Image: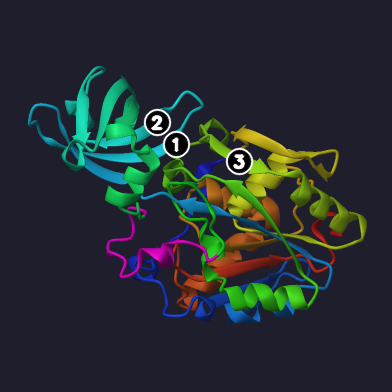
Amino acid sequence: MQTDLFDYHLPPQLIAQKPLERRRDSLLLAVNCEKRTFEHTLFRDLRLYLQEGDCLVLNSSRVRRARIHGFKEGGGAEIEILLLNKDDNGKWNALARPARRLRPGVRLKFAGGEMEAEVIETHERGEVSIRLSGRAGRSVEAIIEEIGEIPLPPYIKAEPDDPERYQTVFASQLGSAAAPTAGLHFEQEELRALEETGVKPAFLRLDIGLDTFRPIETELLEDHRIHMENYAIDESACNLINSTREEGGRIVAVGTTVVRALESCASGGEAKAFSGDTDLFIYPGFRFQLVDCLLTNFHMPKSSLLALVCAFAGTGLVMEAYQAAVMSGYRFLSLGDACFFNFPNGRDTFK
C-alpha cells in the first residue's frame, strides 16, 4: 500500500499553536460513517451523537515533564534529554541533542548534581539508553517533575501559558511523552453530564512515545516500523466494555491511543485485562474487534495515526472529511479541533 495515499495538504496556519480558553469550545466535525455525511458543530454537542448505554473509553496517562537539560560531567557542553520511557530494569530510552557528543560511559549532571545519568547505549536518530540516579535517595521521578519541561510536539512553536492545558482533566498515571490529545477537549462537567445520560466511562492507560509524531518515511506503508508503547487495562474496565457489547451498547474510543490499546487486548471479540507493550500497527485492512466509534483530533499527513483512522472509517471518507475540515478552517493536530467518526448502529453491524 502506497504511503502517499495518506497524504494531504495541511496549510501551516491551520496548525493550532495555543489551546482555546475553554476546552469544550473546540469545533467538532461529526462524520456519519453509514450515511457518509458531515455535520459542523461544537465539541460541547458531542452528547447529541452518543447514546444511553455507550461506553466511553479514555486514556488516563499523564504527560511526564520529560524534557531536561544537563551538562557532561567535568563542565562539558549542555545536553538536552527527552525521556521517552523506562524499562523494567530501570533503564530509560531517550532522545539526546546533540547526540554526537555522547558515548557509552559518559556521565551527565542535572540541576547542579541533584540527578545524574550514565549513557548505556547510543542508537540511530539521536536515541540513547541511560540510567538515572537521584542524590541522597531522592526519587528520580520527583526530580524530573521538579526540573523538567513539558515536551510539546515539534510543530508547536509557542510556549504554553499553562502546562496543565496539555494534560487531560482525568490524567492520573504518569508516563507519557505526549498527551492523548482527543481527551484534551473534555471538561469535568462534560464527563458528568454524559454519565447522567447513561454513557459509561472506562479508563485504560497507554503511555505515548514521541514516535507517534514521526511521519512515515517508507514508500510502502507496510514497510514502516511502528513504535512500541506500554499499556494497561484492568479487569473492571474489561468487564464494563464486555458487558456494554453484550447489552448492545457501543464502544466509543477517545483517541487513537485508546483504539490501539483496545484492539491490542482484544481476543475473540472481548477485552482481556493486560499490562505490557504493544507494537500493533493498524492500517487499512485491519479487522477491528472492539471499537464502534472514534473521537480523535486531525492528524499529520502520512502518519501512522492517520493510517489508523483510515483503517477505521475508510480512506476515501476520511480524506473527504479532512478536506472539508481544511476548507472550513478547522484547527489541526494536538491543540486543534476534533472529529467524531460515528457508526450509529455500531461498526460491526455496518456493511
The residue to which callout 2 is attached is 92
Say left or right for 325 vs 13: right
Is residue 63 at all visible to an observer of this figure?
A: yes
- Residue displayed at 58% across by 34% down: 222
Q: CA distance from mark 2 to mark 3?
A: 17 Å
- Residue displayed at 85% across by 63% down: 249
Q: Amino acid at mark 2?
A: Trp
Residue 325 at x, y percent in the picture: 52, 72
For label 1, count other residues whose C-alpha is less than 10 Å away and answer few (under 14), some (14-19) or many (20+).
many
Q: CA distance from mark 2 to mark 1?
A: 6 Å
Whether pointer 2 and pointer 1 mark residues with C-beta atoms closer than 8 Å, the reply is: yes
Going from N to C along the chain, the mark reached first, 2 or 1, is 1
Callout 3: helix, strand or loop? Answer: strand
Going from N to C along the chain, the mark reached first, 2 or 3, is 2
The residue to which callout 3 is attached is 231
Say left or right for 37 vs 247: left
Splitting the image into 4 quarters, where does residue 283 fall? top right
The residue to which callout 1 is attached is 85
Residue 53 at x, y percent in the picture: 84, 68
Q: CA distance from mark 1 to mark 3?
A: 12 Å
